[in-house]
Image (cartoon, rainbow, N blue to C red):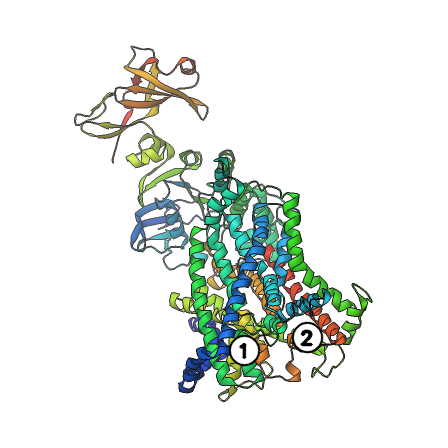
Amino acid sequence: MTRVGRQLTAASCVAIPAAFLAVFFLYPVGSILARGLGADGLSRLVDLPGRASFRSVAWFTMWQAVASTVLTVAVALPGAHLLARRRFRGRSLLRAAATVPFVLPTVVVGGAFLALFERLGLADGPLRLTRTAGAILAAHVFFNVAVVLRTVGTFWEGLDPRATEAARVLGASPVQAFRWVTWPRLWPAVAAASSIVFLFCFTSFGVVLVLGGPTRATLETEVWRHAVFRGDLASATALAIVQMAAVVAMVVVTNRLQRRRAVGQRVVRRAVVPRASGGLLAGNLALLAVVLGLPIAVLVERSLTRGRAGGWWGGLTLDHYAALADRVTLLPVSALEALGNSLVFAVVAAGLAVLVGGLASVVVVHGRSAVSRAFDLGMMLPLGASAVTVGFGMLIALDEPPLDLRSSRWLVPVAHALVGVPFVMRIVVPTLRGIDVRLREAAAVLGAAPARVRREIDLPIAARALAVGAGFSFAVSLGEFGATSFLPRHPDRLTAPLALFRLLSQPGDALRGQAMALAVLLMVATALSVLVIEGWGRRGSVRGDL
Amino acid sequence: MGPTRVRAGGPVNRPVDGGTAPVGLEVQGLSVAFDGVPVLAGVDLTVAPGELVVLLGPSGCGKSTLLRTVAGLEQPVAGGVWWGGVDLARVPTHERGFGLVFQDHALFGHRDVAGNVDFGLRVVGMSPDQRAHRVARALALVGLDGFEGRRVDTLSGGEAQRVALARSLAAAPRLLMLDEPLGSLDRSLRERLTAELGALLRRLGLAALHVTHDHDEAFALADRIAVMGGGRIDRIGTPDEVWADPGTVHAARCLGHENLVVLDADGECALGRLGSGSGTVLVRADGLSVGPVGGGLDAIVASVARRAGRLVVTVVVGDLSVRVPLVDGHDAGVGSTLRPGNRVGLVVAAGAAVRLVD
C-alpha cells in the first residue's frame, strides 16, 4: 500500500467511529444538557427537589436499587462459591444457564414474572405482587444473578486457596476461615460486582415499566412518561439530567472499586478441586432453579396453554403462536411482522456495531495514546449512559434540521448499534491486545510484509472476536426496549419488544397468551444467538468478557 | 510471486573480491539501546556459511537482542549487519531471508501444523503442491511425519519446538537463528533434542546462530562459542580455545569453570605462586589431581559428589576450596574411598593457572 493510502486508511479508522459517536450520541446528549441547563431548564431543575412527586420517585429509585443489589448478592454468593471451589457434573452447563437471564430482553422478563404471579395466584388479592416493589426486586435478582456469579466466581477461582487451607490447618473453622481469610480478599470483587448490579437496577427501565405499573416509577420511567405520554419535554429534560448526574457519579465509584480489585488479583491454577457434597449442590441448584428457572418455565407453559381455565399444563395448544400472525387492534402490524422488523434491525445494528466497533478497536489498540484513550472511554459512554438517555437525546436532537433523521426507520438500528458498539469493543480490543507480538515478528521473519502480517495474523484472530461481538450486538438489538420506546412509532418500525409491551399492558387471556408466545420466541432467539456465538468464540482465542 | 528475494535451498556461498573465502553474516560495531539504556555495546561477530556459532551468556546480557537486531526486529543505534558483503540496514525483516526460532515457539494458534510450517512458502507464492511437499519434508526432518493436520495447541512442548524449527527450516533461510529454543523443556528432553538439533544442523550445513545460557548445550553444539556479557562479546573461539583460555572472569563463569582464585600482590595464594602480581586466575580442572597425602599440597576433603555421572571432589586448602573432577578408571578407585574429612595430597600441574581479566 502506498503511503497516502495508508494515511487514508488510518484517517477513516478514526473518522468513522468518531462521526458515529458524535452525531448519534454526543450531539443528542449535548442537546439534553443545553436544553436542561439553559435559563428555562435551570429554573425547572432547581425547582425539582421541592416537589414531593420527584422526591418520592428519587427515593424509590434509590432504595429499590439498593435492595435489589443486596438480594442479588445474597442469592448469588453461594452459587459463586460452588462454581469457584467445587467440581461437579454440569458445572459449565450451570455457568452458561445462569448467564441466559442476563441477556434476555427486559420486557420478556417482565412478561415472565407477570405470568408467574398470575399462575401462583399473586396477581391480585391480599398477596398481590403485581405492581409492587417486590415484583421489581424479584425480576432484578433474576437478571443480575449472572453478573455476581460470573465476576465474583471467576475472581474467587483465582484466589490462592492455600491461604484458606493454612487457616484451616491452624485450627480455624470453615466459617472462621471464610470470615478472616477468604472474605477480606474476596470483598473487593463483591463490591465491584455490586456496584455494577446497582447501576443496572438504578437505570432499569423495561422491568419497572411492565411490573411496577403507574404507581411504582423510577427516574427512568418518569423521563419516558413525561416525554412520550405527556409531551412535557421540559420536565423530562430536568429528570434526565438528574439521572445522568447520578449515573456519572456511580460510574466513577465503580471504576474506583474495580481498580482496587485489579491490584489484588493473582491467578493460581488449582491442582485439585474438591467434589461438591450432595447437600450443598442440591441446595444451590434448587435455589437457582426457583429464582432463575421458574419464571421461564411458567412463561413457556403459559404460552402453550389456554390460560387460567385450563390449570397447569391443561389444554395444551399452539393457538397463541398461530395468533401471532393475526392483526389485533392494539398493534398497527401483526406481532409476527414486528418480530420480522426486529430481526432486520438486529442484522443492520450488528453490522453497524461491528464496523464502528471494529474500527474503533483498531484505533484503541494501535492508535497514538491520547487518541486511543479518548476512543476507549468515548465509545463506552453509550453503555454507561442509560438507554433512556440515548433514546430521549435522539428524540429531542434529531428531529429538526440539520439532522432530521426521525422520519427514517433506520434510526432504530442506529440507536441499537450505539449500545452494541461497546460490546464489540470489549471483546475485540482484548483479543487484538492479546495477539502475541512475536507472532507478528515470526511472520515477518518468515517473509511476510507488514500488510501481509495484518491479513494473515491480526485479521483471522480478530475475525472470531468480531463475530462474537456481532452476535452480542444482534441479541442486544433484538431485546432493546428503552431507547426504542422513545423513537417515533410507525408501523414499519414497531419492534417485537415494543409489540410485547403493548400486548402485556392489556388484560385478557387471548392477548396474554399471544404476548407469552411472542415473549418465548424473543427469548429463544436472543438466548440462542448468545449461547451459540459464545460457545463458538470460547473455543477460539477470543479473550474479552462482558 | 512475492518479493524479489531469492531463497536458496542451502547455504549461500558467495565469493567476495574474487577471493574464495565465503562470507556469511558479518556484524560490526553493533549497538542497540532501549529508551537510551544500552543493551548492545559494539558487538563484532561473523558467521560463515555452514558454521554454527553459539552465543552463551546469562539472561539479560543482550544475546536475544543481538538475534532480533540481526533479524531486523530491532534497530541499531550504531554499527550494522551485513550478509555476503551486502549492508542490511535498509532491508526490512521480511526480506532478509533469515530464520528465527523463538524461545517459546510463537506458533500461530489459529493455524494447524501445516499452516504454520508452510507460512514462509505461502508468502513467497509457492504453489500448494510444492508447499505440501516441502512441509512434509520439513516435518520429516524434525521427526514429526504426518503431523500436518494437528492443531498447535494439542502439541507437547517438545513437539511445538520441533514444529517451530520445521517452520523456519521449510522457508530455506540462509541463516537460522535459534533463541534458547530448548529453554522451556525439561532437562532430559533438552539434552536429547540438543543432540538431534546438532546433528540436523550439521547435516543441512546451514549458517546458524544459536543462543543459550547453558554451557553444556553450547559445548555440545558449537563450531565457535561467543561468550556475551554486559552487551559485548567477551570471548569468541572454538570450544577448546575458549575453555582453555576464557579471557575474562565473566566468561570463565559462563563456561562452567569453578576454580577461580584471587592472587595477592606477589601472585600468591593457598595453592602457591600462580602468577606475577595481583589478579584473578583460573585453575583449570584438568590441571588438578588428588592422591595420597604427601604428594603435592596438604588438603582436606570437604565433599564428594557425582555430577553428570563423574565424581567431583571438593577439597579445602588453607582458605581456598577447589573442585577436582576425577578421571574415570585412574581415579575412580580412589574417589569411591574418599570421605569428607579425609586428608589428601592435591597436585597442581604446571600451567594449570590461566590469567583472567576482571
Q: Nearer the viewer, residue A389 or A350?
A: A389
What is the three-letter code of the residue carrying label 2? Leu
Q: Earlier in the sequence, mark 1 or mark 2?
A: 1
Q: Secondary structure at mark 2?
A: helix
> Does residue A429 appear anywhere in the picture?
no
Q: Position of residue B73 (x, y in %)?
A: 41, 55
Query: Residue A3 appears in which quarter of the rendering?
Result: bottom left
Residue position marked by numbered label 2 in the rendering: A504
Q: Which residue is mark 1?
A: A222
**Which chain does tag 2 point to?**
A
- Chain designation of label 1: A
What kind of residue is marked 1?
Glu
Judged left or right of residue B289, residue A16 is: right
Residue occupying image coordinates x 45% and y 26%: B308
Structural crowding at the residue carrying mark 2, measured as other residues with C-alpha within 10 Å and reported as few (<14), some (14–19) or many (≥20): many
Name the residue at the bottom extreme.
Answer: A401
Q: Is residue A281 above or below residue A401?
A: above
Label 1 residue SS: helix
Query: Pointer 1 and pointer 2: residues touching (CB < 8 Å)?
Result: no
Q: Quadrant of the C terminus of chain A?
A: bottom right
Distance from Cα at disc 1 to Cα at disc 2: 19 Å
Q: Where's residue A294, x and y in %?
A: 69, 60
Q: Position of residue A448 (x, y in %)?
A: 49, 59
Residue at the far front: name it: A126
